[in-house]
Amino acid sequence: MQNTKATVRIKSGPALTRRITLSGAAATTLAALFAPGFKAALADTAAPMADTSAYPAKAFAQKTKDDTIAALFNMTATASTDISFDAPDIAENGAVVPVSITTTLPDVTAIAVLALGNPFTLAQAYQFPAGTNPAVSSRIKLAKTTDVIALVQAGGKLYSVSKNVKVTLGGCGG
Amino acid sequence: MAGSILVRASSDGTATTVQALIHHPMDSGFVKDASGKLIPAHYIQVVEFAHAGTVVLTAFWGGAVSKDPFTKFSFKGGKSGDALSISWVDNLGNKDSTTATIS
Amino acid sequence: MKRILLAGIALCVAAPALAATLSSPAAEQKAFQSYFFNKFPAVAHDDFVNGPYAMDAGMRAQWKDILQFPPYQFSIDNGKALFTAAFPNGHSYGDCFANKGIGITQNYPMFDAKSGKIMTLELALNKCRTDNGLKPLDMEKGDIADIEAYMASTSDGKAFDVKIPNDPRALADYRAGEAYFYTRRGQLNFSCASCHVQGAGDHLRSDVLAPALGMTASFPLYRSTWGNTGTLTRRFIECNTQVRAVPAKADSDVYGDLAYFLAYMNNGLPVGGPGERP
């Protein structure tokens, strides 16, 4: 069952600090972060390291769909058929639910996943620089049967698609 | 365990596909242990993937991302032998990073 | 906490004539395998080692997704590091096993002619430690599961070849394991066979019951419910607890015998471990 052959195993490097920090950004919205100037700011030669200065903490603390979308993007979403959202109809285990999002929409800058039945609505958000294909696969927890929403920010607008995922064995709360 | 990040990155000449698995409990703060005590929240908040000094994906995660999180995405460019760096930081300030070679 | 809902499984169906009525282990093995091959004609024989994933298309799709980068990869890596590291006395695990421990998982459990007992891989690893002056490891999870994950990865796809040598004690061990498998126990009065023979393929709450054939072949397993990799012993204890029976001790003879019986039934199927389960 294992598939070890292609694994690349590397030692950890020293933790560098990213040269560009976005002070106070945690409190602001991603709409601001995803403004065009942001990407240019990151065109830095040293390998950029993760830091939490841009972490949208406020959006992650919201408990409704509307509040989350407002905190994260500061705009409203319209339903789109140009997003393909792959999640199981019935999750084999709420603790590990594979989700994949891909879209044909141009100029994608962000993709986010919301699980309405979780204690906190926002599960994850990704920032897409130009040149990165607008698709991401990951695994999330679902506390119970719920609508899961994929949001795609493209060309300055926000689009969404929703899917109900049935959970019989809960993922112990997102 | 040495290093928390496993990466597979491969180029088909035009695009590089990246798959990463990170060893992390991703405790949401809502789960109780065997003795009924809440396990405190402990999860990765930000993951940065970079190629040639440029960020190719930034992930922002909450406690609802599964334990030992998996991420798959692809970006245009990148060739066999190039370096791909991945770094993460969690809500307790722990960090790790690694540099993989694109195959 | 872990309440189980038993409605819905046809538990009162008469047990198939698998146990004790046949004369030799070899004949029993053949009948056991045919029972499952006939019950699930659509399942490829080798696929029985994938337990619930062989039974349910939706679960299978999610499993395939997860196998893109399976979470037990960390266990294999850690297990390899532990397996290859030298003990304080300069020996290492490999010295305790045939072929330095590489590609041998399919031969376990093994009858030990010296003691007359069954050596599961877990017991053999712990014996290796105590023989080298080290403390035995927890038999359910942690380092032992990781070492087994690494060892299983070196046997990937090899067919199980568990032997019952011509020794009355080996046959007695096999019979003890078989008896344990078919005996009802616990407040709920279930045998292993109630769920994994008669109930195989049925849903029990969110689970799909694994058929007994192949059910030990993918251990150790990373289970999302556990959040880490665990051994067959851990699963035995969990299944005993589910029916509110008192589990045996992790290193008991009877769990060794049970593993021996089940692995012998698997003969011919491939090593599927380490595995992944919901």
Image (tube, coloured by chain):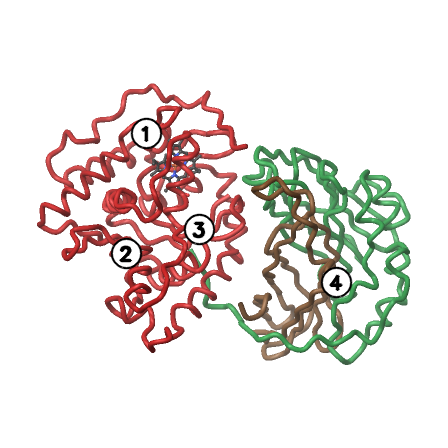
The chain coloured red in the image: C
Tell me if A3 is positioned left or right of C200 in this view. Answer: right
Q: Which residue is tagged 2?
A: C106
Return the x and y of residue A26 as percentages of the image width and height.
86, 58
Q: Label 3 vs label 2: CA separation?
A: 18 Å
* The C terminus of chain B, quarter of image: bottom right
> Is circle 2 on the same chain as circle 4?
no
Label 3 element class = strand
> Is circle 1 on the same chain as circle 2?
yes
Return the x and y of residue A59 as percentages of the image width and height.
83, 49
Q: Label 1 vs label 4: CA separation?
A: 51 Å
Tell me the crowding category of disc 3: few under 14, some 14 to 19, or many 20 or more residues within 10 angstroms, Cα based.
Answer: many
Q: Which residue is tagged 1?
A: C191
Q: Which residue is tagged 3?
A: C230
Q: Which residue is tagged 4?
A: B58
